Image: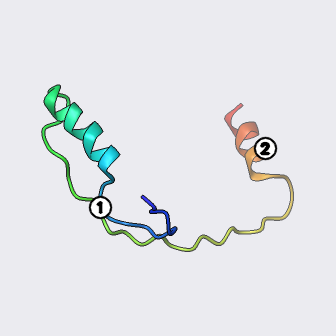
Amino acid sequence: MSNPNGRITLEYSPEEMKVTQSLIDAGLLKSVKPRCNVQTVDFMPVTIVGRPLSETIVDERR
């Protein structure tokens, strides 16, 4: 989640902890795992020539 400074934190906010504790108390969760520190990879879309890929996929499914 992000904090007011716009930085991403790995800790749960007090609101999130309150909700997860309610779920634990209700028996819907057994535990809360720590957040994972996974870095996102920059995505570079590939330019294709011709019809949009979504149209090609729809046509092939028919």
Front-most of residues 22 and 36: 22
| Residue 59 occupies quadrant | top right
Where 32 falls versus 10 (above or below)?
A: above
Query: Could you tell me residue 10's position as x and y percent?
Result: 32, 64
Residue shown at 57% from the left, 74% from the top: 42
Q: Residue furthest right?
A: 50
Q: Which mark is residue 11?
A: 1
Q: Amino acid under label 1?
A: Glu
Front-most of residues 17 and 62: 17
Residue shown at 68% from the left, 68% from the top: 45
| Left or right: 52, with 24 as reference point | right
Residue shown at 29% from the left, 61% from the top: 11
Query: Could you tell me residue 26's position as x and y percent?
Result: 17, 25
Q: Count neighbours of disc 2 (C-alpha within 10 A) and say few if under 14, some if 14 to 19, many if 20 or more.
A: few
Q: Which mark is residue 22?
A: none
| Residue 28 occupies quadrant | top left
Measure how far apart labels 2 and 1 are at the Cα level.
Answer: 42 Å
Front-most of residues 40 and 29: 29
Mark closest to the chain's N terminus, 2 or 1: 1
Secondary element at tag 2: helix
Secondary element at tag 1: loop
Residue shown at 73% from the left, 38% from the top: 58
Q: Quadrant of the C terminus?
A: top right
Q: Amino acid under label 2?
A: Glu
- Residue annotated with mark 2: 55
| Left or right: 51, with 9 as reference point | right
Q: Count neighbours of disc 1 (C-alpha within 10 A) and say few if under 14, some if 14 to 19, many if 20 or more.
A: few
Cβ atoms at labels 2 and 1 below 8 Å apart: no
Where 16 falls versus 9 (above or below)?
A: above
Front-most of residues 3 and 38: 3
| Left or right: 20, with 4 as reference point | left
